[in-house]
Structure formats: C-alpha cells, structure tokens
Amino acid sequence: MPSSVTSQNDAAAPRGRYHHGSLREAMVAAALELIEAHGVEHLSVREAARTAGVSPGAPFRHFPTKAALLTAVAEQATERLHAQVELGLANSAGQPALLRFAAIGEAYLDWAARHPTHFQVVSQRQLLDADAPARLAPHNDAIRARMQALLDEAFADTPTALARLPALQLLGRALVYGLSRMGVDGHFPEWNLGHASAPTAVRDAFVLFIELLATGRDAQTREAVARWAARLSA
C-alpha cells in the first residue's frame, strides 16, 4: 500500500498545455497541483486558471467559486476510486466473498495512499458545493452496494448475523477511511509502531480486521484468508 504525493497528478496536464475542450480537466489538474504546493486554503479559481494556462476569466462560467472547483476535483476522485475498486474486484474474482470484500478495502487504502490530495478534498465535504453529495452519490453508492452484496454472501449461512451487517459495512468503511485519514494527516508517528512503517501498520490493522471476520466462517474461507494474509505480510 504505497504512498507518494508526487504520483497524485497522474491525470494532470503540464502547465500551459490547455487545449480547447479540456478546460475542466486542466482546471482540476491545476487545482491538485496548487493544493499540493500550498494547501487547499490558498487555492483560488484565478490562480488555478493561471496555472492551467488559460485566461483568468475563462473558467468562471464553469467554476464560479472555489467550492465549485473543489467539487469537480471530488467528482474526479470518486470516479477514480470507484474504478480502482472495480479493478480490485476483477482481480479477486473467484475468491470467497470475504476476500472480495477485502479487495474493496485494499483498493480504497491503496488509492488514498497513492492520491492523498484527491482523498483530502473528497473527505472534506464542508469545502464543496451544497449539491456535492448528490453529484458524488453514483460512485459512492455503487461501492456501498458492492460491499453490502459481498457481506450478504459471506454471512448467508449465519442468519443471526444478517441484522448486524449494515453496522459491519459501516465499520469496514470507517476503518479504511480512518486509516487513510491518519496517514494523510500524519498521525502515525505519534503511535508506538515500533519498527513498523506507516504502510505496514495500515496493512496489519486491515489484515487483522479481515481475519476477525473470518472467524467462524467455513474452512475454505478461513484457509483463503490465511493465505491472503501471509501473502500481504511476505
């Protein structure tokens, strides 16, 4: 689960490379560059336009406010997170449902570590437009639906657990969100991690969560989870 701020701008266009028809993408890339360099509090639409190489007034029809620009960044973030989740699920096809559920968490943690600026923006809803939740909902809802379906499958043989699956789904999301937030905000040095790096601590916490969920599952699932945990720790 690597982390690199410099890898954030995989979609960023080089400064001055704006082409007609790509204003939105150029402005989002410029916003990400400026946030990384100076922090979100110093972002402005005018400065993003200068960085993107467009005239100062050009973006204001599309981005009348800083919140509108940040909402576009958040939309890109949720779209790319969803794509990474789907890739993780495709790569885990054929595995027990619990490991496909784990693949969603792995994808989230990896995406947040690789793209901390995207994560920072999308996780600060107070900075976005009022209609941002509705605009971000399609991708977020799709991920939640995947989580629910996989938990339903993983615990289908345990009727007593079914009523608690919504709470379990929330717990899983809270874990990966919290670990990602701690990493982006730089909290890990405050914890007694021994010789473990922050990525190792994140991995170990997530593996423990999945191993606990595997308790009481069928032997095939437990064995698959054990192999998965050993592979991640190797």
Image: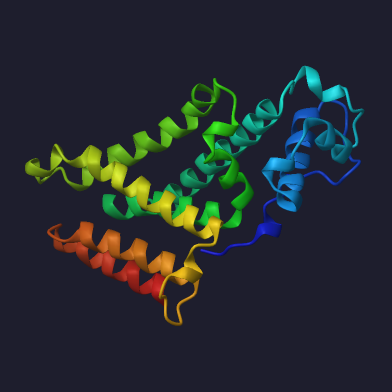
Residue at x 69%, y 41% (from the top left corner): 41
List x then y, in percent, for residue 197: 49, 74
List x then y, in percent, for residue 76: 62, 36
Where 161 falls versus 56 (above or below)?
Answer: below
List x then y, in percent, for residue 224: 27, 64
Residue at x 52%, y 29% (from the top left corner): 136
The image quarter in which residue 22 lies: top right
Relative horizontal placement of residue 230, taking residue 26 as reference (left or right): left
Where 29 falls versus 4 (above or below)?
Answer: above
Relative horizontal placement of residue 59, taking residue 65 as reference (left or right): right
List x then y, in percent, for residue 194: 42, 81
Q: Residue furthest left?
A: 160
- Quadrant of image for the C terminus: bottom left
The image quarter in which residue 102 lies: bottom left
Where 233 falls versus 208 (above or below)?
Answer: below
Q: Is residue 138 visible?
A: yes
Q: Is residue 92 visible?
A: no
In depth, the one of 188 and 111 nearer the eye is 188
The image quarter in which residue 113 lies: bottom right
Snapshot colouring: rainbow
In depth, the one of 208 and 37 nearer the eye is 37
Q: Residue furthest top?
A: 61
